[in-house]
Image (cartoon, grey):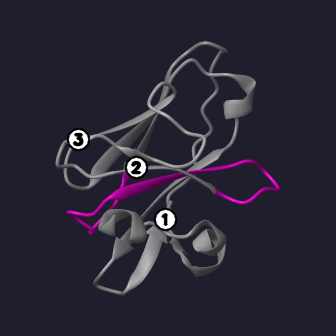
Amino acid sequence: LQCRIKCLPQHLLSSSSKASNLAKPVVAVTTGETVSIDCNLGTVTNRVACWYKQIPGGVPQFVLYYYHSGASPTYGTGFSSSKFTSTHQSTTDYRLTIKNIEEGDSAVYHCATWDDSVNEYVSQ
């Protein structure tokens, strides 16, 4: 529960988070494929990676959060392990995997975390 509180509330994602200057890659896939999206939290370590899905013109939807300790991800309403999962490569590198891609999965996916050093949310 404490980890979930550290994920940015949906209505604040665009207005209160400091966006990364990294380029936003576009991934083209075919229906039925599996796709992975990587996120590097930069200098923020030992924090959860919070993933959001945003359809153009819509508000971000909380997909899941994942901590590198190896526990299972915690999912937002309407999202499940049958479609989405997350793994880590280090305490700063996280990956969102989307299985069996469908047209409705087309969106911008954000990752975000809490940065204690500046007391604000950071996202990319």
- Say which quadrant the N terminus sits in: bottom left
Earlier in the chain: of badge 2 and badge 1, it is 2
The part of the chain drawn in magenta is: 40-60
Characterize the magenta stretch by its predominant secondary structure. Answer: loop
Which residue is depicted at the point 74% across and 25% down?
Answer: 103
Q: Residues within 10 Å of mark 3 (few under 14, many from 20)?
A: few
**Where is mark 2, residue-wise?**
39
Front residue of 17 and 66 = 66
Residue 43 falls left or right of residue 10: left
Helix, strand, or loop for circle 2?
strand
Residue type for callout 2: Cys
Give the x, y percent position of residue 21. Answer: 51, 66
Whole-angstrom CA distance, mark 2 to mark 3, is 10 Å
Residue type for callout 3: Gln
Give the x, y percent position of residue 102. Answer: 68, 22
**Where is mark 3, residue-wise?**
89
**Where is mark 1, residue-wise?**
123
